[in-house]
Amino acid sequence: MTRTQELRALAERHSAHNYHPLPVVIAEAEGVWVTDVEGRRYLDMLAAYSAVNFGHRNPRLIAAAQRQLERVTLVSRAFDHDQFGPFVAELAELVGKDMVLPMNSGAEAVETALKAARKWGYEVKGVPADEATVIAFEGNFHGRTTTIVSFSTDPDARNSYGPYTPGFRVVPYGDVDALKAAMDETTVGVLIEPIQGEAGVNVPPSGFLTAVRELCSANGALMIADEIQSGLGRTGATFAVEHENVVPDVYLLGKALGGGILPVSAVVADSDVLGVFRPGQHGSTFGGNPLACAVAREVIAMLKTGEYQERSRVLGAHMHERLGALLGEKVREVRGRGLWAGVELNGKARPVSERLMELGVLAKETHETTLRLAPPLVIEQDELDWALDRLEIALRD
């Protein structure tokens, strides 16, 4: 039995089967490359669903983590620490809002935003108690907690987890008329992914985000942009909403904010929204911990240069040009922005993922027929072309 088989057997025997990973066991990683336990190298074209935007073990981020590890890692929010104030101030400045509420996972950020929207609806908008509604979209993916799966339209994510949390309305993604019809005086928020990642990197019709913004303003509802996957440089801009010059009321951030080192998430909004929270009404022991803040501060500093956004824009255009040339018998559609693409196949994507792995490239399928590509933003063009050459081979085989 090989080391890979041994380790996979352990995982199969003792781990809940909530994932279906490719048959590879990673032992080391650096930049855009990972190495398995057998010593084989692979180019990572997934970047942990955007959590590794800045590459594996980015030297600046590792150095920031090491410096903080030598000082203090956790005090809880019972006390302040010297990284907290600078972190929330710097993130607020990057986003252009007043306040930051740090959490850990992306799902926690979404849950926090839902609580904030409801509280804001009752205490500021004046919605009658327990009547607040939030609108979400078909194909959404905002996490897997019991409340969040209550408005999921993915059977795998939703089925057998009821009874479901009330207070949500779901409308087709990209349908302005359906959104308008669903909004009323009880609507406190519209929760939207500017690009739907898990659904297959679905880009909304041009003007849709602008229409969402206008409808939220007209109906006194909060526009809540889930930028957990799409944000922090992935689409060629700091935030995907920037492609339509839209400013939501609430930004949800995560994944890349932790630099691929630890989970960090945040809800960012102005004080008229996040100011509804009072001491004891919401919190997290690990949210905003010193280590997380130190790493996230370095992420923010790196984003301020605009280098990573520009790399994603330029290399993304090159990637989409090459992917567009694959349209035909095997490839039905290519969607995405920047260094983010959903390659819609005329067949199942799992065999293509497995063949790519054999060829030294790691990518992952979603919803049976879509191959997702999201390389770290530090990838070089020759590395990107190397991976795309192998995708062409995988599609021919």
Image (tube, grey):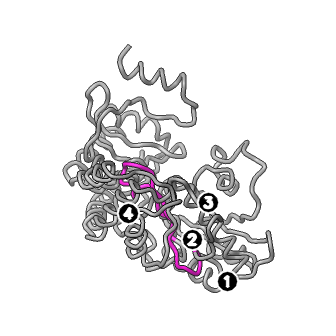
Mark 1 or mark 3, which has the lower sequence index? 3
Kindly identify the residue that appears in the image at 23 percent across and 51 percent down. Answer: 59
Q: Residue furthest top?
A: 1
Q: Which mark, residue 89?
A: none
Kindly identify the residue that appears in the image at 54 percent across and 73 percent down. Answer: 250
In the image, 361 versus 281, the foreground residue is: 281
Q: Could you tell me which secondary element the residue under label 4 belongs to?
A: loop
Q: Position of residue 151 (x, y in %)?
A: 68, 57
Please name which of the two marks, 1 or 3, marks the residue nearer to the observer.
Answer: 3
The kind of residue tagged 2 is Ile
Q: Which residues are magenta?
A: 251-274
Q: Position of residue 163 (x, y in %)?
A: 78, 49
In the image, 336 versus 235, the foreground residue is: 235
Check disc 1 and report the residue beneath it: 219
In the image, 46 versus 248, the foreground residue is: 248
The kind of residue tagged 4 is Gln
Dot 3 surroundings within 10 Å: few (below 14), some, or many (20 or more)? some
Which image quadrant: the N terminus? top left
Q: Which mark, residue 83?
A: 4
The kind of residue tagged 3 is Glu
Q: Position of residue 13 (x, y in %)?
A: 54, 22
Check disc 3 and report the residue beneath it: 111
Mark 3 or mark 2, which has the lower sequence index? 3
| C-alpha span from label 1 to label 4 | 38 Å
Mark 1 or mark 4, which has the lower sequence index? 4
| C-alpha span from label 2 to label 1 | 14 Å
| C-alpha span from label 4 to label 2 | 27 Å
Q: Residue furthest bottom?
A: 218
Magenta stretch contains residue 262: yes
Check disc 2 and report the residue beneath it: 224
Please name which of the two marks, 3 or 2, marks the residue nearer to the observer.
Answer: 3
Magenta stretch contains residue 237: no
